[in-house]
């Protein structure tokens, strides 16, 4: 039995009869229940999705480490911020300037990657069809497979995949007791199994390795020391000020996944003094003391539900600003808001494709803080706000507006409300998409500079 711990969104194809059917998906918060945890740890292998709460996993570090030492195998996906199994290395962001800087390269053989052409891991595109590597260089987007690296690997680690010209450690494996840990420092490894390319074998290979049917044939050896990438520039912390007024108290609601943890630790954001509101542990009453409530994108819906009454109460306070970011099912809890699904177009800047994004209300004061680049990288569906809201970014389809991608509502409740289907915290914390970081910076500048006018 292979259990895949997830952060709330099931894997596509979970119930089909292909290799995906080998995974049983379990909400990671079930680890907090004694009986459920015992069942999880009775599995033969675990897959830890990249969207799982690292603070939660950290609370169960001893149990997860014991699972491996007793002979279990674990695939760890994503960017490890706080190690939750003995031996895990912290992920480090790579300063990259082009596609070749994030190109994956084979370093040591591993059965999971057997038969894969590494060029098929380099680019992704939503353009239909099967494309040559040369064509993908024209229309594909690099960086999904990995955009960072690991140092301080355990002594017996083997680097499987390197990234960029220095082959910095991206994927690595190591033994722990009688078991083994495989780490992929990018988007979930299993999501790269694509029937149209050589990566079609990645999923079946992974299942076979997790089940113990294929043993590593490569002698584990110490990783070759890597050349570190240039350190990111930092700005000294300080108190943000707006027109001589004290900076607002800004709370970031999150569920302990790697993007908000990395965002909260970003020195470039230190002047805004973001306050962590970790939903599994926090009291919803803390929102009453905040000036700005930011509902981070991609929250676990079960954890968010406990805070919805407090968020709705914050909307009744004229001194507050509430910002709700993408993929939070707002149509289920924000009064009067509708939603229409649209597929995400993430490749348009490579193909020149028009994704339908249009900017509106050019005289609106919000455009003192927003730029075209900060709001036109991609989105996750359309919003239909209540009458009176100002839609600043919309979707145009067949010559007509079909919905809003970002709007501000200052008339339907006492508080200021900004809602968008863009997910800037996820992408900023992932070190991916500069436009997403620009949107996050812009929103923080906006609430800081205009706080005195609201208070």
Image (cartoon, rainbow, N blue to C red):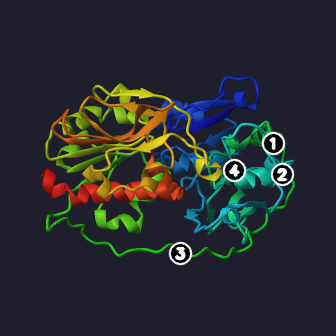
Q: Pointers 2 and 1 in contact (CB under 8 A)?
A: yes
The answer for how far apart the CA atoms under marks 2 and 3 are is 31 Å
In contact (CB < 8 Å): disc 1 and disc 4: no
- Whichever of labels 1 and 4 marks the residue nearer the N terminus, that label is 4
User: Label 3 near label 4: C-beta < 8 Å?
Assistant: no
User: Does the CB distance between marks 2 and 4 fall below 8 Å?
Assistant: no
Which structural element holds mark 4? helix
Q: Nearer the viewer, residue 188 or 127?
A: 127
Q: Which residue is mark 2?
A: 117
**First-in-chain label (2 vs 3):** 2
Q: Position of residue 214 (x, y in %)?
A: 84, 44
In this view, the residue farthest toward the front is 399
Q: Split into 4 quadrants, where in the image is the N terminus?
A: top right
The residues bearing labels 3 and 1 have C-alpha atoms spaced at a distance of 35 Å
Q: Which is more N-terminal, label 3 or label 4? A: 4
Residue 260 lies, in percent from the top left, at 43, 52
Q: Please, what secondary structure does the residue beneath circle 1 have?
A: loop
Binning the other alpha carbons within 10 Å of mark 2 as few (below 14), some (14 to 19) or many (20 upward) gives some
What is the distance, in whole Å, between disc 2 and disc 1 at their CAs? 9 Å
Residue 101 appears left or right of 418: right
Question: In 3D space, how far apart are the residues under numbered discs 4 and 3 (Cα atoms)?
Answer: 30 Å
| Pointer 2 or 4: first along the chain | 2
Residue 143's x, y, as percent?
64, 56
The numbered mark, 3 or 1, whose residue comes first in the sequence reads: 1
Between circles 1 and 4, the one closer to the viewer is 4
Q: Specify few, some or many for label 1: CA neighbours under 10 Å numbering under 14, 14-19, or 20 or more.
A: some
Gap in angstroms between the C-alphas marked 1 and 4: 16 Å
Q: Which residue is mark 3?
A: 231
- Nearest the viewer among 208 and 15 is 15
């Amino acid at each position: 039995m292979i259990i895949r711990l997830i952060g709330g969104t099931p894997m596509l194809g979970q119930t089909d009869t292909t290799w995906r059917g080998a995974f049983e998906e379990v909400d990671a918060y079930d680890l907090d229940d004694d009986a459920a945890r015992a069942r999880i740890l009775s599995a033969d292998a675990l897959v830890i999705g990249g969207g799982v709460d690292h603070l939660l996993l950290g609370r169960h570090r001893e149990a997860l480490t014991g699972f491996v030492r007793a002979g279990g195998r674990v695939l760890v996906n994503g960017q490890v911020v706080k190690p939750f199994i003995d031996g895990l290395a912290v992920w480090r962001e790579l300063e990259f300037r082009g596609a070749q800087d994030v190109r994956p390269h084979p370093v040591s053989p591993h059965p999971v990657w057997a038969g894969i052409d590494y060029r098929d891991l380099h680019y992704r595109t939503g353009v239909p069809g099967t494309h040559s590597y040369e064509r993908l260089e024209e229309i594909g987007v690099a960086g999904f497979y990995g955009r960072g690296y690991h140092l301080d690997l355990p002594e017996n680690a083997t680097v499987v995949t390197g990234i960029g010209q220095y082959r910095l450690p991206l994927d690595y494996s190591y033994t722990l007791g009688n078991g083994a840990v495989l780490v992929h420092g990018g988007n979930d490894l299993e999501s790269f199994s694509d029937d149209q390319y050589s990566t079609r074998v990645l999923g079946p290979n992974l299942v076979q390795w997790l089940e113990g049917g294929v043993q590593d044939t490569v002698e584990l050896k110490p990783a070759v020391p890597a050349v570190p990438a240039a350190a990111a520039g930092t700005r000294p912390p300080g108190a943000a000020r707006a027109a001589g007024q004290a900076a607002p108290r800004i709370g970031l609601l999150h569920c302990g996944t790697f993007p908000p943890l990395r965002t909260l630790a970003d020195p470039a954001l230190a002047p805004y003094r973001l306050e962590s509101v970790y939903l599994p542990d926090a009291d919803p009453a803390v929102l009453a003391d905040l000036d700005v409530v930011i509902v981070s994108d991609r929250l676990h819906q079960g954890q968010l539900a406990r805070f919805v009454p407090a968020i709705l109460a914050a909307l009744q306070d004229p001194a507050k600003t509430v910002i709700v970011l993408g993929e939070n099912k707002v149509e289920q809890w924000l009064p009067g808001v509708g939603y229409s699904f649209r597929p995400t177009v993430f490749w348009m800047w490579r193909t020149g494709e028009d994704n339908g994004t249009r900017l509106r209300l050019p005289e609106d004061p919000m455009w003192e803080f927003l730029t075209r680049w900060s709001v036109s990288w991609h989105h996750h569906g359309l919003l239909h706000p209540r009458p009176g809201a100002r839609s600043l970014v919309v979707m145009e389809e067949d010559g007509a507006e079909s919905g809003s991608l970002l709007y501000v509502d200052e008339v339907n409740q006492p508080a200021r409300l900004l809602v968008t289907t863009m997910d800037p915290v996820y992408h900023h914390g992932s070190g991916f998409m500069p436009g997403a970081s620009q949107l996050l910076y812009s929103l923080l500048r906006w609430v800081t500079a205009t706080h005195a006018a609201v208070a």
